[in-house]
């Protein structure tokens, strides 16, 4: 009697959506988080589907949770957030690597981030007028920079003859 050869392949695990795309304009708030779902094991399977997630080489991505399990008959939602502050204009791409150790399956989820240059709102010619008489008026000038980068400025004071 000769032995029978049986080939067993790893299960196909489909996460939805299969990719994520974010848009960000420099100076704006970070884009909203997105989610993807990890499906449970097939009906009749024993136990929950366990997973771990990492984003190798992408310090602009965060994932929550980074590990867990999808209960039988349900799914687990994973939240993906991008941290674009400090990234230059252009595109950044990476993948989330989801490992299903019990099943020997790895699923990569492509993630793209498009960073657009910010729009300048700088007005370089602000004029503050103040008329003082001889009664000794005082003016306090306070300059505030609400940006994260230094802003150049200059102050010019003119006498009564605009000189």
Image: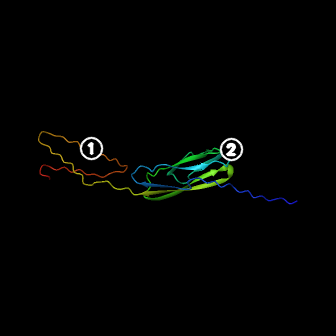
Residue farthest right in this picture: 1
Q: Quadrant of residue 72?
A: top right
Q: Nearer the viewer, residue 61 or 141?
A: 61
The answer to whether 79 appears left or right of 42 in the picture is: left
- Disc 2: which residue: 47
At x 68%, y 47%, the residue is 43
Query: In front of the other: label 1 or label 2?
Result: 2
The earlier-in-sequence mark between 1 and 2 is 2
Tell me the quadrant of the picture where the N terminus can be found: bottom right
Residue 66 horizontal/vertical position (percent): 57, 46
Instruction: Say if 10 sits above or below 137 in the image.
Output: below
Residue 119 in the image, given as x and y percentages of width and height: 35, 56
Of 20 and 116, the residue lying toward us: 20
Numbered mark located on residue 142 in the image = 1
- Which image quadrant is residue 116 in? bottom left
- CA gap, disc 1 to disc 2? 65 Å
The residue carrying pointer 1 sits among few (fewer than 14), some (14 to 19) or many (20 or more) residues within 10 Å by Cα, namely few
Look at 28% across and 51% down and name the residue there: 153
Left or right position of 148 against 94: left
Circle 1/circle 2 CB separation < 8 Å:
no
Residue 65 percent coordinates (x, y): 56, 45
In this view of the protein, which residue sits in the foreground, 22 or 46? 46
Of residues 3 and 162, the one nearer the viewer is 3
The secondary element bearing badge 1 is classed as loop
- Residue 43 — which label? none
| Side (left or right) of 85 relative to 17 | left
How far from the left and from the top, in percent, is residue 117?
39, 57
Number of numbered tags placed on the structure image? 2
Q: Secondary structure at mark 2?
A: loop
């Amino acid at each position: 009697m000769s032995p029978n050869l049986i080939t067993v392949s790893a299960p196909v695990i489909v996460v939805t959506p299969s990719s994520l795309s974010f848009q960000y304009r420099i100076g704006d708030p970070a884009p909203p988080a997105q989610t993807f779902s990890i499906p449970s094991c097939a009906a009749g399977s024993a136990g929950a589907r366990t997973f771990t997630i990492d984003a190798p080489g992408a310090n602009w991505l965060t994932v929550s949770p980074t590990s867990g399990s999808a209960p039988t008959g349900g799914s687990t939602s994973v939240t993906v957030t991008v941290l674009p502050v400090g990234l230059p204009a252009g595109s950044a791409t990476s993948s989330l690597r989801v490992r299903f150790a019990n099943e020997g399956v790895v699923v990569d989820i492509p993630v793209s981030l498009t960073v657009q240059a910010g729009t300048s709102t700088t007005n370089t010619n602000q004029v503050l007028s103040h008329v003082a008489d001889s009664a000794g008026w005082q003016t306090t000038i306070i300059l505030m920079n609400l940006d994260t980068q230094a802003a150049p400025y200059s102050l010019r004071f003119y006498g009564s003859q605009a000189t």
